[in-house]
């Protein structure tokens, strides 16, 4: 007999108003353990609002939004590093705020730095890093808290194509290795398909989930999958759904 575990994140009929602006309506969204769910949608349809609700920063106007875990990681488009702190000290910051003892904090930071491939750069300051390395530092900082649910708000949007693809590979590897569930916001349909087990298409406004696509490709994922006709076909279908919802 299999025991059903509740989804880590479960939104039912969620609506959200900001004054007279109806930002979200009738949003049903769940993220289970083992899932990496991406959300694509036109600008202003409420994607960031979804993440802010998930992280408890925003109170919903209607429906229910439950998050089962307290171990939540966040990575945003801006790496938000402290300029005067080294990579090591930036990576330790969250653990420090959570009052993790010094030796344990140092151990977790060293492990996270290794996981994101920044070993050797521990003493660098943020201004001495490339954009991709800053993002890796931000990712490592969240990994020190061993998140069960990871929320990503367009983390790679500002990076060049090659760096973005490399970080996509690294994130996929971490997803398989570290076993967290992910909710990932992006404007890139190809990125969403490559990273995810499921892609949701939002339409706006007010924003709602218009379509859901399961991604059938195995994990761990071969980077060359991006050049196959099956991959292109799925990207095409999702892009089409995005255009339909935009009308
Ligand atoms: N704090 C706020 N006060 C008022 N309106 C808000 C607030 N936050 C978001 N909104 C409105 O809610 C809608 C959704 O915004 P949100 O930032 O979630 O969209 P988005 O899909 O993430 O956009 P983008 O893709 O451009 O980042 C927008 O119309 C926005 O103006």
Image (tube, grey):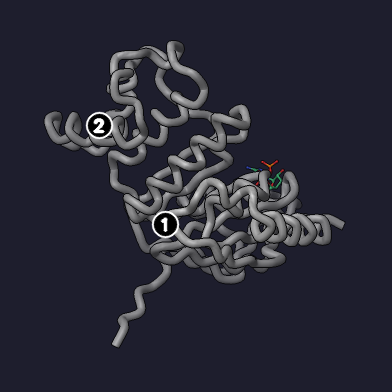
What percent of the width, then of the height, locates residue 14? Answer: 60, 65
Please report the residue visible at 61 percent of the width from the left and 59 percent of the height from the top: 199
Q: Is mark 1 within 8 Å of ligand 1?
A: no
Residue to which mark 2 is pinned: 109
Q: Residue 182: give x, y in percent of width and height.
A: 46, 54
Residue at 19% of width from left, 33% of height from top?
105
Q: Position of residue 122 (x, y in %)?
A: 29, 19
Q: Residue at x 61, y 35 (%)?
A: 157
* Residue at (64% x, 48% y) in the render: 227
Secondary structure beneath disc 1? strand
Image-quadrant location for residue 116: top left
Q: Earlier in the sequence, mark 1 or mark 2?
A: 2
Q: Is residue 212 above or below residue 18?
A: below
Say left or right for 28 vs 5. Answer: right
Q: Is residue 137 visible?
A: yes
Residue 49 visible to the viewer? no
User: Which quarter of the frame holds ligand 1?
Assistant: top right
Nearest to the observer: residue 184 or residue 85: 184
User: In the figure, is residue 5 to the left or right of 10?
Assistant: left
Discs 1, 2 touching: Cβ within 8 Å? no
**Where is residue 9 shown, x and y percent of the image?**
45, 63
Which residue is nearer to you in this view: 25 or 62?
25
- Pick whichever, 215 or 125, lies toward us: 215
**Position of the N terminus by quadrant:** bottom left
In the displayed structure, does residue 46 sit left or right of residue 34? right
Q: Which residue is mark 1?
A: 181
């Amino acid at each position: 007999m299999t025991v059903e575990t509740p989804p880590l994140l479960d939104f039912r009929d969620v609506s959200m108003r900001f004054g007279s602006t109806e930002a979200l309506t009738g949003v049903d969204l769940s993220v289970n353990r083992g899932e990496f769910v991406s959300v694509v949608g036109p600008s202003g349809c409420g994607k960031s609002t979804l993440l802010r609700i998930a992280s408890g920063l925003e109170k919903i106007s209607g429906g229910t939004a439950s998050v089962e875990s307290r171990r939540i990681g966040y990575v945003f488009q801006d790496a938000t590093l402290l300029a005067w702190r080294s990579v090591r000290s930036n990576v330790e910051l969250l653990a420090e705020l959570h009052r993790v003892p010094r030796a344990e904090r140092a151990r977790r930071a060293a492990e996270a730095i290794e996981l994101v491939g920044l070993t050797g750069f521990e003493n660098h300051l943020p201004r001495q890093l490339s954009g991709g390395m800053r993002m890796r530092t931000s990712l490592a900082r969240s990994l020190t808290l061993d998140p069960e649910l990871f929320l990503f708000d367009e983390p790679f949007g500002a990076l060049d194509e090659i760096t973005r693809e490399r970080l996509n590979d690294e994130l996929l590897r971490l997803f398989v290795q570290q076993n967290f569930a992910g909710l990932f916001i992006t404007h890139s349909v190809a990125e969403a398909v490559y990273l995810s087990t499921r892609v949701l298409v939002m339409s706006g406004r007010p924003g709602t989930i218009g379509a859901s696509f399961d991604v059938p490709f195995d994990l761990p994922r071969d980077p060359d999958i991006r050049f196959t006709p099956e991959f292109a076909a799925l990207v095409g279908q999702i892009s089409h759904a995005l255009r339909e919802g935009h009308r």
